[in-house]
Amino acid sequence: VTLDALQGVAYHNDRQVRRIAADYADEPVAGGGLAVEVGELDEK
């Protein structure tokens, strides 16, 4: 769902996404939470 929401905002098509990483906090966030970081991948 997150990739679909970022399509047209962070990239043109989600086929451009090459890497996804997830980190979990030690404590839950009341009401939930999501932080997204977008950057260019250096494939050299």
Image: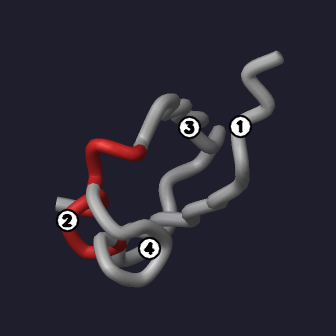
> Is the residue 32 above or below the residue 22 in the image?
below
Residue extending farthest to the front is: 44
Element type at marker 1?
loop
Give the image quarter of residue 42: top right
Residue extending farthest to the top is: 44
- Residue appearing at x 55%, y 31% in the figure: 21
Q: What is the C-alpha distance between the residues marked 3 and 1?
A: 22 Å
Q: What is the C-alpha distance between the residues marked 4 and 2?
A: 24 Å
Mark 3, mark 4: which one is toward the viewer? 3
Q: What is the C-alpha distance between the residues marked 2 and 1?
A: 19 Å
Task: For label 2, count other residues whose C-alpha is less than 10 Å away and answer few (under 14), some (14-19) or many (20+).
Answer: few
The quarter of the picture where the N terminus appears is: bottom left
Q: What is the C-alpha distance between the residues marked 2 and 3?
A: 21 Å
Question: Which residue does the numbered mark 2 point to in the structure image?
Answer: 4
Which label's residue is closer to the chain start, 3 or 4?
3
Question: Which residue does the numbered mark 4 point to in the structure image?
Answer: 30
Q: From the viewer's perspective, is 23 left or right of 28?
A: right
Element type at marker 2?
helix
Mark 2, mark 1: which one is toward the viewer? 1
Which label's residue is closer to the chain start, 2 or 3?
2
Element type at marker 3?
loop
Question: Which residue does the numbered mark 1 point to in the structure image?
Answer: 41
Q: What is the C-alpha distance between the residues marked 1 and 4?
A: 32 Å
Task: For label 3, count other residues whose C-alpha is less than 10 Å away and answer few (under 14), some (14-19) or many (20+).
Answer: few
Q: Which of 24 and 1 is in front in this view?
A: 1
Q: Position of residue 40 (x, y in %)?
A: 72, 49
Element type at marker 4?
loop
